[in-house]
Amino acid sequence: MSIRFRILLSFMTTLAVTVLIFFLTAYLISVAVTGDARSISRFYNIHYTLHPLTAEEETIFMEMKYLAKENPEKLKSRTLLENYDFQLKMVQAGLIVRNNSELLFMSPTLRETKVESALPDYEMNNYSIRNSFNVGSRFFSYAKFDFYFSEQDRGSIFVIRERSPFAEMIRTLLPILIGVLLAILLLTSIVIYRYVTRTIVNPINVLRDSAQRIKEGDLQFKLKPESADEIGQLSMAFEQMRQKLNESIGLQVQYEENRKQLISNISHDLKTPITTIKGYVEGIRDGVADTKEKMDKYIDTIYTKTMDMDRLVDELFLYSKLDLKREPFSFETVDLHRFMQDMFEETEFEFRNKEITFLWEDARYPEVFVLADREKLKRVFSNLLNNCVKYMDKLDKVIVVKTTVNDRQFTVEIRDNGPGIRPEVLPHIFERFYRGEPSRNTKTGGSGLGLAIAKQIVEGHGGRIWAESEWGQGTSLFFSLQILSTHGDNDAKNINH
Ligand SMILES: Nc1ncnc2c1ncn2[C@@H]1O[C@H](COP(=O)(O)OP(=O)(O)O)[C@@H](O)[C@H]1O
Ligand SMILES: [Mg+2]
């Protein structure tokens, strides 16, 4: 059963019950007021008995009465009677003149009413000249005058008028009343039904159509809730669901795109060294490397290319494990300053050889403990520092490491005075395989995975990584980690991702 039909049914039931209750109430009220249902008509009878005729009828009646007293024979004149009857007819009354048991005259209008049978007997004292009577269900009021045409020749004048007693009135008015009532009820019902349909059924239909569209894979539409009621809320929830679905499908498409890009990048990055190695191996096989120096050079190149490939595969492997959250982190409480001090001892030595000024603003904070995976954190530092060295283009090479503690965040800044990063490149440097310099020249060659790996590791620690750079001036890479405590304990914690 559809909602529309159910609503219609409920309206019809209400309608029927309302009509029933209306009649029942009307009946009960009439009984309560009058004592019993029929006494209403009795009340009207009394009224009409006292005032059976209107003023005009009364005048005509008086005239005839006068005539009956003074000159009764005249009342036998048919033309006169017809004339009176005509006047009475104008005011919707009728005339009967009786002579003994015979009717001398009867208005044609009264003929089909059979009033003659109900006419009262002679009563020569004329005590009761105004009264009413019923013929079947019809009700009449009259004024009568009894007189003698001559001795023993009795006559009566009746001016009769049909009245609508209450029952009669109701009987004629009831169908109209019921009609009007029903029409009002029906009209209200239709209006309410249309309103309910518009506010409930139509939005539900819209929702159903939307669900159908979603089922068919069409998510490019917008659902506007038209009210704030439950249906509106449902529409809103539906619209949110559509948006989420649309977003997730969009994300899926993007993931798919990324995956294709990744495969293409990997193939390219592996293909290049393999081609080189193949070329040199062929050179050796064909005897092109005929001298010892040439041979050494060929072997060296093959070795470096193999190492490049090895590193690339390692990085790729690490990145993919981090990306799939399959790389376990062994977290422990680490005193970051001590940790950096140990690590930088080696770095400083290495940088001194490369004539790089390495500055570390250190030891201003005694102990800062964070939860970290030492090996992975080392990897972050080495990836960031390697970039500084690799892209350095100045003669005066300076790399500065600065640490700040605020708001329970430990922030490391690694700054260089290298070439800087162009503003349009900056937002992409943490993307996998993204390289600021797409021509993969060997000096600055790399996989484009260094920063992507650093990002995965920092985020795996619940931290944040970002970069700032001024083109031509240098680059700053920041990462921040949540501080455990500044005093701390050394409880090792192992959390596997
Ligand atoms: N210190 C830096 N100075 C200038 N450019 C940098 C620096 N660090 C990163 N970049 C830019 O960010 C890109 C991405 O770095 P990364 O993910 O380490 O990949 P790769 O070093 O293999 O190119 C680099 O190609 C480079 O353009
Ligand atoms: Mg790098």
Image (tube, rainbow, N blue to C red):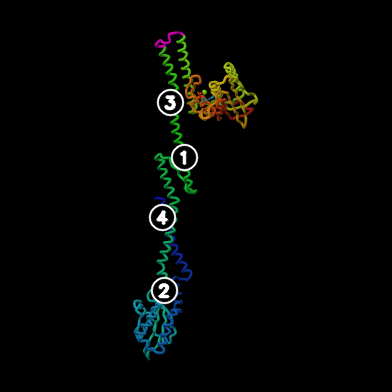
> Which percent across, then down, holds residue 53?
43, 79
Magenta residues, start to end = 284-292
Nearer the camera: disc 1 or disc 3:
3
- Whether residue 241 sits left or right of residue 393 in the image: it is left
Identify the disc placed on residue 243.
1
Query: Which residue is at the far bottom?
Result: 151
The answer to which of 261 and 205 lies nearer the viewer is 261
* Among numbered discs 3 and 4, the one appearing first in the sequence: 4
- What amino acid is labelled 2 in the image? Ser
List the residue tagged with mark 4.
9
Q: SS for tag 3?
A: helix
Q: Do the CB atoms of the residues marked 4 and 1 lie less than 8 Å apart?
A: no
Spatial CA distance of label 3 from label 4 is 66 Å
List the residue tagged with mark 3.
264
List the residue tagged with mark 2.
164
Dot 3: few (<14), some (14–19), or many (≥20) neighbours within 10 Å? few
